[in-house]
Image: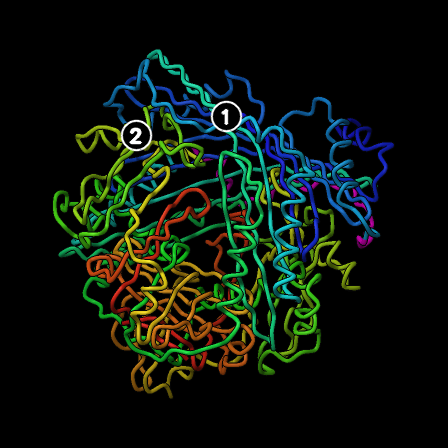
């Protein structure tokens, strides 16, 4: 993998730093006496040194009982846009300045901090079975957070977007931040008890996804640690809930023609109309489980292991406004702090509402604080009140609508 | 090498330039259940240039020292594009020093097979516990050498060795899945990951016990934290807010975080310092070449000082504390904690719980995070306290609070300081940075807990 990336960093509403990152990384997997050896290096390393390291580990490696991919034909997945290479630092900086200008005009006193970057990366995979795969990708990402202090109280808002194409228009990003600011202008409070809760796309991505990513991981299933291990073909979720891993959508940062083992990538439906369809696998885990790789062998700093490329929850038909209108007393969750600190394996989550709003008699009454939400993903997605028609990408790796759930435990001060 | 680095900087027009080179290598062993999933080696070499021009920064990373002068020139050009005011950067005496790695039982002297054998023993003990479904074990050791040269003439080489181990036991019954983990770490001492047989059995036993434990009801409770969890608490609930890069360009936060403000009772003292020897967050110089210090963040309940880089110190007219750290050459140094702890007081554990009618005793850690104002952290193990005694085990809990009120709600500080060396800290994409944190047992009133 060879990559180059330029980043503009803003602090306190101003440009603070420009970074250029160049990196080269190489990973080597060998099979010796039927066992796998593994070594990786960032920076310049001699091939023989890398081989020596891999040989040191192979006596301890797992038995290889699968075939590495040979010549494959890959799906056509567009992940490179030459316009990203033509983007200048000036373009990136002015995009950041435009977002900040609009947000500050809406809410004087807010301090924005963000990072905007563009770059390209080339991934090449060769193996001795005859595979030679190469993919060049471009990427452009924007993250901008605003912090507002009022009477010793801190409010955090923000947006994050990324694409393989240049992001040119600042308006959707500043618009999203301003929407959050406007909803949070007043304060409100909610009692302790069970209430209906709407998770916005940010809320779904932050609070509900981590347990699902763990439960559908073929490795968790193989270990017997997934609550879904024996649920294939069973309807576990609400009939309106469908959930996929889809690396074939053009120009999405999670898209790719092949995984990090050189296996062709494909759309995998994990849940279809509430029914568990399949789990996701890499080569090794699939072999142990007696199944095939689903093209989800990804390196996350080590040997390939199962991980999703780009998760998509199918949208529903309900506009967010209508969901809100039907709630007498409830909560909207945008950001839940600490949600991933619970027992993810079991689907439990619990977190402090970092950004969320109280709904009273069908309208948003204001922002809540000092409020803990507690739930279990499996219970909550079994009985969904409504699924929104407002799907969006969060950071390029999750596409989800808002989801309204009937009864969730809330504790507040 | 030194001459190559200095000559690349020479003649450039910038207020400050530094070049940092990293060389590291590590070994890793990962188990899932009885399968050894990964035995891997990795190596990394690279470096970066950081330049300061009129208050703006340029930062360039590279994998090869070829054309180093061009990379320096690019960093200076980028900084020049950003900079529109005067640079502020606290002066320090430029050091020339070589700091070799500290170690007791050097993990690099131990064969991979011997490391694997020890982990096998722990794994067998955990997997042999009835109702333990599976386990997960991650071991790594890393040796690293960092070279820093600056346009002020500093030339510092520092080496270190890190060891870390995480054991997790996962129990399952009737579709319920519960887990308990243990994290251990040290700076250069393999002995800390040896002789953990009882600990391994204990986490397996606790994971099974959690299957029968009830959920707590959400609400506010008096909680007692053990030294490990209290260490995570002090890191999240106060440590991050004391990092000056959150404060220095935020006029309102500067008012809120004015030195001299009272945050807690007279019994409360909070310290951070890499100069505290022998811990995971210890070092001699930070990544800007500032010597390590030991800083009282809170002294007798009052905000006394904060953690600085050379830039934040200069902009706040305070003194650099040696807290500018970078996780590797791909990142510039930012303000980070090192070894953070609450100083011990006088209360014994028994006295601390004796007058609690209904409360929670929370132990061990699972995670923690902060928004500066609010924080959450989660216990790996928790019990009800009833009528002054530790009572039934409950399922793990997530605790939350407000930074500005919670420290004042600490009404008892124990006499039994212990440091947790098993954690890593994440900030601005740089994770996990070796840190340690600790505390004696502490008691907090009115702590909000999520639950059924």
- Residues at circles 2 and 1 in contact by the CB criterion of under 8 Å: no
Front one among B63 and A386: A386
Determine whether, in the image, residue B170 is placed left or right of residue A97. left
Q: Single out the mark in the foreground, 2 or 1.
A: 2
Decide if residue A369 is in sight here.
no
- Figure quadrant of the C terminus of chain A: bottom left
Decide if residue B83 is in sight here.
yes
Q: Secondary structure at mark 1?
A: loop
Q: Which residues are magenta?
A: B88-111
Image disc number at residue A266: 2
Residue at 49 percent across and 34 percent down: it is A164
Determine whether, in the image, residue B370 is placed left or right of residue A362. right
Residue behind mark 1: A1
Residue B425 forms part of the magenta stretch: no
Residue at 36 percent across and 25 percent down: it is A261
Front one among A217 and A42: A217
Disc 2 versus disc 1: distance between alpha carbons?
21 Å
Disc on the earlier residue, 2 or 1: 1
Q: Is residue B403 above or below residue A76?
A: below
Q: Is residue B331 above or below residue A129?
A: below
């Amino acid at each position: 993998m060879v990559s180059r990336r330029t980043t503009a960093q803003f602090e306190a509403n101003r440009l603070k730093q420009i970074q250029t990152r160049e990196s080269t990384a190489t990973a080597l997997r060998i099979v010796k006496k039927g066992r796998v050896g593994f070594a990786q290096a960032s920076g310049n390393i001699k091939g023989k040194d890398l081989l020596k390291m891999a040989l040191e580990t192979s006596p301890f490696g797992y038995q290889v009982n699968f075939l590495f991919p040979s010549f494959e034909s890959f799906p056509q997945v567009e992940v490179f846009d030459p316009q990203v290479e033509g983007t200048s630092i000036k373009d990136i900086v002015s995009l950041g300045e435009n977002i900040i200008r609009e947000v500050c005009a809406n809410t004087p006193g807010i301090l924005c901090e963000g990072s905007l970057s563009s770059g390209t990366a080339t991934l090449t995979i060769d193996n001795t079975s005859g595979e030679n795969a190469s993919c060049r990708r471009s990427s452009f990402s924007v993250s901008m957070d605003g912090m507002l202090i009022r009477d010793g109280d801190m409010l955090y808002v923000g947006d994050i977007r990324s694409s393989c194409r240049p992001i040119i228009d600042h308006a959707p990003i500043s618009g999203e931040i301003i929407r959050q600011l406007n909803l949070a202008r007043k304060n409100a409070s909610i009692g302790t008890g069970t209430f209906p809760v709407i998770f916005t796309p940010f809320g779904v991505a932050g609070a509900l996804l981590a347990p699902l990513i763990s439960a559908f991981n073929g490795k968790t299933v193989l270990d017997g640690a997934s609550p879904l291990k024996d649920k294939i073909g069973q309807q576990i979720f609400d009939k309106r809930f469908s959930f996929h891993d889809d690396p074939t959508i053009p120009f999405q940062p999670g898209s790719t023609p092949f995984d990090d083992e050189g296996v062709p990538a494909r759309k995998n439906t994990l849940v279809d109309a509430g029914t568990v369809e399949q789990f996701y696998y890499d080569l090794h885990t699939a072999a142990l489980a007696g199944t095939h790789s689903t093209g989800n062998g990804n390196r996350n700093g080590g040997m390939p292991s199962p991980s999703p490329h780009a998760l998509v929850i199918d949208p529903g038909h309900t506009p967010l406004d209508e969901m809100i209108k039907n709630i007498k007393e409830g909560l909207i969750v945008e950001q839940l702090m600490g949600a991933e600190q619970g027992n993810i394996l079991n689907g439990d989550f619990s977190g402090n509402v970092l950004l969320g709003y109280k709904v009273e008699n069908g309208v948003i009454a204001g922002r809540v604080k000092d409020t803990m939400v507690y739930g279990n993903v499996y219970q909550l997605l079994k009985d969904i009140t409504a699924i929104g028609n407002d799907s969006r990408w969060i950071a390029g790796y999750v596409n989800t609508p808002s989801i309204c759930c009937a009864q969730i435990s809330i504790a507040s001060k | 090498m030194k001459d190559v680095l200095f000559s690349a900087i020479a003649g450039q027009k910038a207020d400050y330039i530094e070049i940092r080179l990293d060389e590291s290598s590590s070994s890793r062993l990962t188990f899932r259940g009885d399968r050894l999933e990964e035995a891997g080696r990795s190596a990394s070499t690279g470096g970066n240039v950081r330049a300061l021009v009129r208050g703006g920064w340029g930062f360039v990373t590279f994998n090869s020292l070829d054309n180093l002068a061009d990379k320096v020139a690019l960093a200076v050009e980028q900084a020049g594009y950003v900079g529109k005011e005067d640079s502020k950067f606290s002066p320090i005496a430029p050091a020339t020093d070589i700091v070799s790695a500290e170690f007791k039982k050097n993990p690099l002297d131990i064969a991979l097979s011997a490391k694997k054998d020890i982990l096998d023993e722990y794994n067998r003990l955990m997997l042999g516990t009835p109702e333990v479904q599976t386990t997960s074990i991650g071991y790594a050791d890393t040796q690293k050498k960092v070279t820093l040269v600056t346009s002020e003439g500093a030339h510092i080489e520092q080496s270190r060795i890190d060891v870390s181990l995480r054991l997790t036991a996962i129990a399952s019954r009737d579709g319920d899945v519960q887990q308990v983990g243990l994290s251990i770490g040290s700076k250069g001492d393999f002995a800390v990951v040896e002789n953990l047989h009882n600990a391994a059995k204990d986490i397996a036993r606790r994971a099974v016990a959690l299957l029968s434990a009830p959920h707590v009801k959400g609400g506010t409770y008096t909680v007692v934290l053990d030294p490990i969890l209290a260490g995570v608490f002090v890191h999240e609930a106060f440590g991050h807010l004391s990092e000056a890069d959150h404060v220095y360009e935020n006029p309102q936060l500067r008012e809120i975080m004015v030195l001299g403000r009272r945050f807690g009772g007279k019994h409360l003292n909070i310290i951070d310092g890499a100069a505290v020897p022998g811990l995971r967050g210890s070092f001699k110089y930070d990544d800007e070449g500032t010597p390590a210090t030991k800083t009282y963040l809170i002294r007798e309940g009052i905000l006394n000082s904060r953690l600085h880089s050379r830039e934040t110190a200069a902009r706040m007219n305070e003194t650099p504390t040696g807290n500018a750290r970078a996780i590797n050459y791909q990142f510039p140094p930012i303000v980070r904690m090192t070894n953070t702890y609450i100083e011990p007081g006088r209360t014994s554990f028994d006295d601390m719980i004796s007058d609690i009618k209904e409360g929670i005793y929370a132990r061990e850690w699972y995670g923690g995070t902060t928004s500066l104002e609010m924080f959450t952290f989660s216990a790996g193990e928790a019990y009800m306290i009833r009528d002054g005694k530790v009572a039934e085990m409950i399922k793990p809990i997530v605790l939350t609070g407000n930074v500005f009120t919670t420290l004042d709600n600490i009404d008892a500080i124990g006499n039994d300081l212990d440091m947790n060396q098993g954690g890593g800290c994440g900030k601005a994409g740089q994770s996990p940075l070796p840190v340690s944190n600790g505390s004696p047992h502490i008691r907090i009133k009115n702590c909000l807990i999520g639950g059924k």
